[in-house]
Image (cartoon, helix red, strand yellow):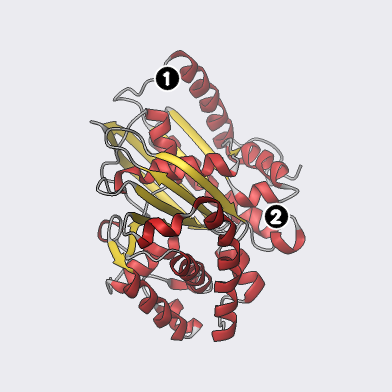
Amino acid sequence: MRTTNGGLGQAARETASHNALRSAHDEVDGAARPEETYAAVDLGTNNCRLLIARPAGDGFRVVDSYSRIVRLGAGVAETGALSQAAMDRTISALSVCAQKMRRHHVTRERHVATEACRRARNGHEFLGRVEQETGLRLDVIPPEEEARLALSGCTPLLDSASEYTLVFDIGGGSTELIWTRLIAGEEPMMLAWTSLPCGVVTLAEAHGGREPDAAAYEGMVADVQARLVEFERKNQVRQHFEDAGARMVGISGTVTTLAAVLAELPRYDRSLVDGAFVSTTDLLAVSRRLAAMTYAERVAHPCIRRGRADLVLPGCAALEAILRTWPSGGVRVADRGLREGILRSLMGTHAVVGAARS
């Protein structure tokens, strides 16, 4: 196993010791206490995200957050392995997460890795290196658990006036679909779910994301749409939308970015995006607007920048495939998901107070 410092550094030793104390504490007391500080890391194919929070009433108050585009899964579809450069970028981001957690004296935590580490043949080896160099222990979770946690994280945004909701998460290496039933006074019921092996990174690598022409864009839409057929066949979701009895909630950088661009924000502001409802007409219009931009113009946009400039169009294509398959009037935008679901699970809470994206 490769290391860059010849063994555990002081920071990693402190975090490893903290992890052991956390585990012992969890076994003694599984209930959230006001003085405890919680943390959750979501390491995906494209992003590394951290949320640190404390219990507050029926929910929790976010005290710090962190997000960095690391592109851990770049090239995995072609080579089957995480690259050295991608692992180094990710280790750097996770080191920042560990520092923030020590600074806030986190007492309980859970950290997860998803599609890139599930798919890569060296995924578990990489996570061993993560623990050695940063002290953070990440669980590679199966797609079903990822879906359940994502649903839990966005539960406060589900419309109680509608019995059925389709929650989707367009990720870097996969796209999750969660068909949900909401009964008043109960936790949402996950009726069906699927994890499609395509996301913004894999679509960009297969079809081109920086400057796709109309044919390439339509090819991405068709690619995703073909993967949705089986889910629709098994669950007959479309009928609920045609009867105007179903809603959509979108969890992803794609829908949050499109909402911010549509609102013409001078910079991304989570408080103006999370929970917003965007019509299908507006989503498709802003997608076409972005498709008409050059890569340089997307880089210059304050809500896109270089980190998303080559991935936003594959995301738009995946979103368009979903909207073509299920005729929704629009999408409720969720700048929340897996991390919030992990925190809710740790705390046993049902809401989020003052969450933030950085």
Judge whether residue 331 can be spotted in this image: yes
Q: Which label sits in the foreground, 1 or 2?
A: 1
Name the foreground residue: 214 vs 121: 214
Q: Residues within 10 Å of mark 1 (few under 14, many from 20)?
A: few
Above or below, 129 relative to 259: above
Rendered-image quadrant of the C terminus: bottom left
Q: Amino acid at mark 1?
A: Gly
Asked if residue 201 lies left or right of residue 261, the reply is right
Q: Distance from label 1 to label 2 (Cα)?
A: 35 Å
Which percent across, then down, holds residue 284?
39, 75
Are the residues at dot 1 and dot 2 in contact (C-beta closer than 8 Å)? no
- Residue assigned mark 2: 82
At 58% from the left and 84% from the top, the residue drawn is 215
Judge whether residue 106 can be spotted in this image: no
- Of all residues, the one furthest to the top in this rendering is 28
- Residue assigned mark 1: 30
Rendered-image quadrant of the N terminus: top right
Which percent across, then down, holds residue 244?
31, 59
Above or below, 208 relative to 331: below
At 40% from the left and 40% from the top, the residue drawn is 152
Name the foreground residue: 205 vs 266: 205
At 54% from the left and 39% from the top, the residue drawn is 145
Q: Which mark is residue 72?
A: none
Number of numbered labels in the structure image:
2
Q: Residues within 10 Å of mark 2 (few under 14, many from 20)?
A: many
Which percent across, then down, holds residue 213?
56, 86
Q: Quadrant of residue 86?
A: bottom right
At 32% from the left and 22% from the top, the residue drawn is 33
**Which structural element holds mark 1?**
loop
Name the foreground residue: 224 vs 30: 224
Which percent across, then down, holds residue 31?
37, 20
